[in-house]
Image (spheres, rainbow, N blue to C red):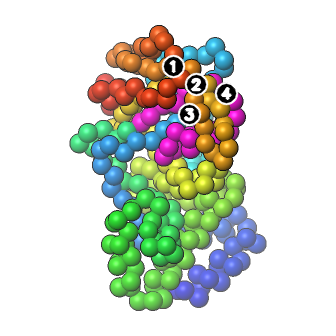
Amino acid sequence: MDLDELVARIRRFAESRRSEQQAFINELVAIHPTLNVRWGPGWRFRRARILESNEIPQTIDDVIWPKNVPAKLGRANTEGFRVLYLADRRDTSLREIGVTREWVAIAQFEIRPEHAVFICPIGELFQIVRTGTGFLLGAASDEVSSMVNVCPIHEARSLVITDAFLYDLMTGHNHYEVSAYISAAIFKKLNHVSAIAYTSRRQLGAINVAVRVDTFWQDWGLGSVTRAYAEHLVLGFYRLEKVTSVVGIFKSGRFQWNEDSSDEEAVHLLAPLYFPDNA
């Protein structure tokens, strides 16, 4: 998009009608290249859920997305479109659900061997330009930086400003009608992208990933499930006590738990990863 037009429309975005905002988002996503990266086997992400004091998850359905209920509007999903929200670290998953002192279940998911997924990291371009390193790309950030540097300056600025603008809409507030619309536009544009990555609003420096569930089990497996009493210390750091783990999963998805609890925070990894037979 022409740089001057882009700047002018961003400046009046907040005062625009919702339909105009959505039309502008559609234009930006359609016009500009959308950075997406291929992640292979071994990447791990977590999902936490607060439990009742005597509750013990019994099956895989107790640690994934809610079933038999319509998907509610979320940061990265429109109403009726289901995604599974995952966090980069255990503490991030606990912070995201507001744990203070509660019993929790923490499930760890991993990309399956010989599989890969394409993830769109919102804000990666502008982060690389500002700091030299992206939120997710690490050493590969140099390649993206080189790509931007060979563009004509007005095109590079338009590309980076667009990414920064979408990032701010995605993470800078809790207006889910806008942030969810961005995700929907990206999923519609790029059928091969199965996840949107963005920085956490609740956990400084952390990353969340919203993975569409209709293809989830094609590439992901369950790597561990832990039940514990979690205590928030300070600043997003947690301590776990009375830890028990799933040590086996039947084909039906039913869990087998170890009998003894421990205050050690070790995670029992399932081998192989669990995924439904029909995936």
Q: Is residue 49 magenta?
A: no
Q: Is residue 90 magenta?
A: yes
Position of residue 227 measured from the top left corner of the image (x, y, whole percent): 54, 23
Looking at this rendering, what residue extends furthest in the front direction?
A: 264
User: Which badge, 2 or 4, comes first in the chain's sequence?
Assistant: 4
User: Which badge, 2 or 3, comes first in the chain's sequence?
Assistant: 3
Position of residue 237 measured from the top left corner of the image (x, y, whole percent): 61, 42
Label 1, residues with CA under 10 Å away: few <14, some 14-19, many ≥20: few
Position of residue 277 measured from the top left corner of the image (x, y, whole percent): 31, 24
Say which of marks 2 and 4 sits in front.
Answer: 2
Q: Are marks 2 and 3 in contact (CB under 8 Å)?
A: no
Which quadrant would residue 190 be assigned to in this image?
A: bottom left
Disc 4 residue type (three-letter) = Glu
User: Which badge, 4 or 1, comes first in the chain's sequence?
Assistant: 4
| Circle on res. 241 | 2
Region rendered in magenta: 87-109
- Whether residue 42 sits left or right of residue 207 in the image: it is left
Residue 160 appears in the rendering:
yes
Q: CA distance from mark 3 to mark 1?
A: 19 Å
Disc 1 residue type (three-letter) = Ser
Which quadrant would residue 26 be assigned to in this image?
A: bottom right
- Whether residue 220 sits left or right of residue 57 in the image: it is left
Q: Are marks 4 and 1 in contact (CB under 8 Å)?
A: no
Can you identify the residue that label 1 sits on? 262
Q: Nearer the viewer, residue 54 or 259?
A: 259
User: Which badge, 1 or 2, comes first in the chain's sequence?
Assistant: 2
Disc 3 residue type (three-letter) = Ala
Residue in the picture at 39% in, 31% down? 222
Q: CA distance from mark 2 to mark 3?
A: 15 Å
| Circle on res. 7 | none
